[in-house]
Amino acid sequence: MSSSDSISKTLKEIASKAESDIASRKAIDELEEWRIAYLGRKGKLTTILRSLGTLSQGERRSIGKQANTIKSQLENLFTSSRDKIRENEHFNKNKDFIDVTLPGKPLTIGRLHPITQVLKEINAAFSSMGFEVIEGPEVEWDKYNFEMLNIPRDHPARDMFDTLWIDYDDPKGKQSMLLRTHTSPMQVRTMEKMSPPIRVVVPGKVYRYEATDSTHEWHFSQVEGLAVDEGITFADLKGTLFEFARRIFGPSRKIQFRCDYFPFVEPGVDMSIDCFKCDGDGCKICKKTGWIEVMGAGMVHPKVLTGVNYDPEKYTGFAIGLGLERIAMLKYGIEDIRLFYSNDLRFLEQF
Ligand code: FA5
């Protein structure tokens, strides 16, 4: 083998060794060692190039060309490896870096549930008419939910309420605790605690064991209203409710009172508002009546007053119990009560 062939072979071996060697260099100082070993002044390639002087001019040209090609290949390899190592080092160093200049992710901001919004309006309307807002328990005794409201045990009026009893028996073995079916027990609790003049509204959840449809939920909200004083008449009840409806629905809404029976008032009425969907013509929502019932009301029954040791000859009062969801449906034109509690953001985000 001529000396030019042997140099050419050595050059190829150096190139292949350098290529496999560089793959294991993962840090800049290791890469620098590689550069010095192959391309440095005393490196393998430079040493070979120095020995070209022993060759003829023709051989020197051809080997020189091969050596320069390998040199520039190795230089390129060095540059690309260095860039890759630098990039990795930068990434590892900045793994936890937070770029505060990037636009932030918008936070989902909550809002008040439509029922809470309507409740606030109702509370404000009654407060401005001199009523105090108070609250009461959702789990109630039979005594307050029924008995003291003139609905004794075994009275057929109990069938008006589809009751969810709590598994608790009194000493006579009768169930005596329940999820309140209405906010009216707070009439009794309030009269027990306070003395006239009384003007309170009591918002809260109530529960009934009933099938749901577009205007009935098994749990819903009521606002109880109670005014007791000397000389309160049915005219006060009507005046208060007309004013309430004007404040919540505006002056153009129609209101209807009809006789109704509730054992704890005498006389008793229910109040309806003309249907928002058909303007009173009759449709599916108002069950073809043109009206949507929003509350029961009446003059506090003398038996209820006597039960809390108020003299019915001296004191009279009126009570109302309105359905909050029904008011919200009328106010916003909502066709199905079940939407309020279905947790559908597409519905809730509209309020
Ligand atoms: C009562 O609950 C009586 N305590 C109201 C009352 C209070 C009468 C004070 C007299 C004096 P009623 O069951 O009708 O009555 O319910 C009152 C209101 O609650 C209804 O007018 C209606 O607006 C609403 N409501 C009744 N049942 C449901 C239901 N299942 N889903 C949604 N709202 C209802």
Image (cartoon, rainbow, N blue to C red):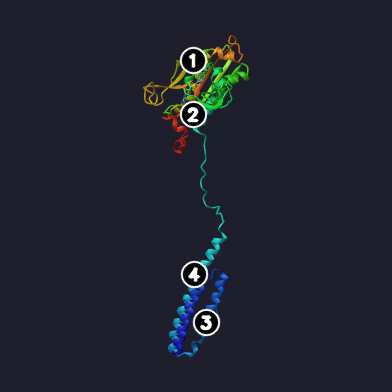
For label 4, the SS is: helix
**If you read the primary sequence from the N terminus, does the residue marked by circle 4 or circle 2 appear first?**
4
Q: Which residue is mark 4?
A: 80
**Label 3 environment density (alpha carbons within 10 Å; few <14, some 14–19, many ≥20):** some
Q: CA distance from mark 4 to mark 2?
A: 70 Å
| x and y percentages locating residue 26 in the rendered image | 54, 68
Crowd band around label 4 with a 10 angstrom C-alpha radius: few (<14), some (14–19), many (20+): few
Label 3–label 4 contact, CB within 8 A: no
* Amino acid at pointer 3: Thr
Residue type pointed to by label 1: Gly
In this view, the residue in front, 349 or 186, is 186
Quarter holding residue 90? bottom right
The span from disc 1 to disc 3 (Cα, nearest Å) is 112 Å
- Dot 1 crowding, Cα within 10 Å, few <14, some 14–19, many 20+: many
- Indicate which label's residue lies in the foreground, 4 or 2: 2
Residue at numbered disc 2: 219
Earlier residue among tags 3 and 2? 3
Q: Between marks 4 and 1, how big is the CA–CA gap?
A: 91 Å
Q: Which mark is residue 268?
A: 1
Q: Earlier in the sequence, mark 1 or mark 3?
A: 3
The kind of residue tagged 4 is Ser
